[in-house]
Amino acid sequence: MIPGTTPGMPCTGRQLQLLAGVTSLLIAPFLFVGGPDWSSGPVYKSAWNLGHILLFALLTLTVRPWQWLYGWRLWLVVTGVLLAVGIAIELLQYGQHLDMEWRDLLRNLIGSWLIIAWRPLLVPENRKAAGKQLMAAITALLLLFELASVAQVVARQFQMTRQLPALYDFRLDKPSAFWSGPLTVSEAHALEGTKSLRIDLGTEAYSGVSLDNFPSDWRGFATLSLTLFNPGTRPLSMTLRINDVEHDRGANAYNDRFNFRLDLQPGVNTVTIPLAAIEQAPEQRAMDMSEVRRLGLFATRLPEPRSVYLLALTLD
């Protein structure tokens, strides 16, 4: 018997190997072309990442490393090779100006481990082997973890669409899934039943935060309203910028987005902006109000660090 082969396996292995190989060839190019970009939504990105598991499961079925290896050597060699291949892929993706995602290395391994762990259990006499059952259970749990992560993103995005007209839920304790930049959750100056977001502004050329994950379809609303609290004794000038997906995927030109100066007096400031003004802001086109992608608040070259609190952000 060839080491690593399992007696009693069906004679359809060659057909399965061929099908897996052809499918792998069709899927592999999408590691480098197509797929989500930096402006794609979280659900698309997280679902797309599951493709690593599928691809490397198919590649394992194609290569069939158990023809030459078995036992701990099979697991060790496959894991080492996949780590090397995975690192090379991530570096190539970085060279193609794609984001490097080191968790993809784990997804690659999960795909291959699933095949290696579950294949022996297709034979009835192997199903009682405790070691094989344990490895199959571990790989299944790893797959469930990845699927649960995607389900969590889907649930969060679904809940987010239900929060309209609010663009952000100020009751949340962790804003990192929605915002980027130097901000922290605070109880100071918050409206009743909510929290505030303290934005810490530095002295660099541009300092601020960006809301990157929010309900993107603003059609059917007339105004954008935001409330900020300036804790200082002097006015604070900031800029509100808003853009759609087309701007993100274009040249990011200044005159292709909405830019609005905010002169914040000490204390509470509420600013209301007609959405028609935002829609008409790009110089050579209308902003796509069904795909608003990013909302930023920033200051420019402050003489000293300042802080400001964001209390509310809603459509009306």
Image (spheres, grey):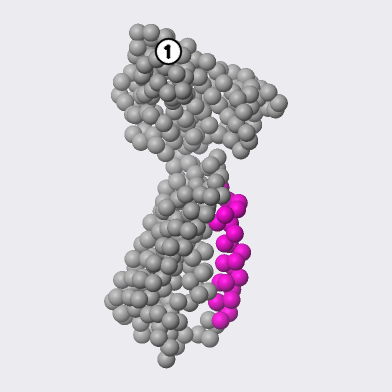
Please tell me how many numbered marks the rendered image carries.
Answer: 1
Q: Position of residue 275 (x, y in %)?
A: 60, 22
Magenta stretch containing residue 73, yes or no? no
Q: Residue at 53% of width from left, 42% of height from top?
A: 38
Instruction: Please name the residue shown 66% across and 22% down the image.
Output: 280
- Identify which residue, 231 or 82, lies in the foreground: 82
Measured along the vertical axis of the image, is residue 22 above or below residue 197?
A: below
Q: Main secondary structure of the magenta part?
A: helix
Is the C terminus in the top left, top right, bottom left or bottom right quadrant? top right
Residue under numbered circle 1:
236
- Residue 116 picture location, percent across and down: 41, 73
Q: Residue furthest left?
A: 130
Q: Judge whether 20 appears above or below 5 on screen.
A: above
Residue 123 visible in image: no
Q: Vertical placement of 291 versus 80: above or below? A: above
Describe the element under mark 1 as helix, strand or loop: strand
Image coordinates of residue 3 in percent, x first then y, are 40, 86
- Residue type highlighted by circle 1: Leu
- Quick check: 134 left or right of 274? left
User: Residue at the spot x=43%, y=67% of the render?
Assistant: 81
34 and 274: which one is in front?
34
Q: Residues within 10 Å of mark 1 (few under 14, many from 20)?
A: some
Q: Nearer the viewer, residue 92 or 62?
A: 92
Q: Which segment is the magenta one?
A: 14-36
Location of residue 108 (image quadrant):
bottom left
Q: Where does the N terminus fall, quadrant-wise?
A: bottom left
Q: Position of residue 223 (x, y in %)?
A: 56, 20
Residue under the image location 28 percent in, 76 percent down: 130
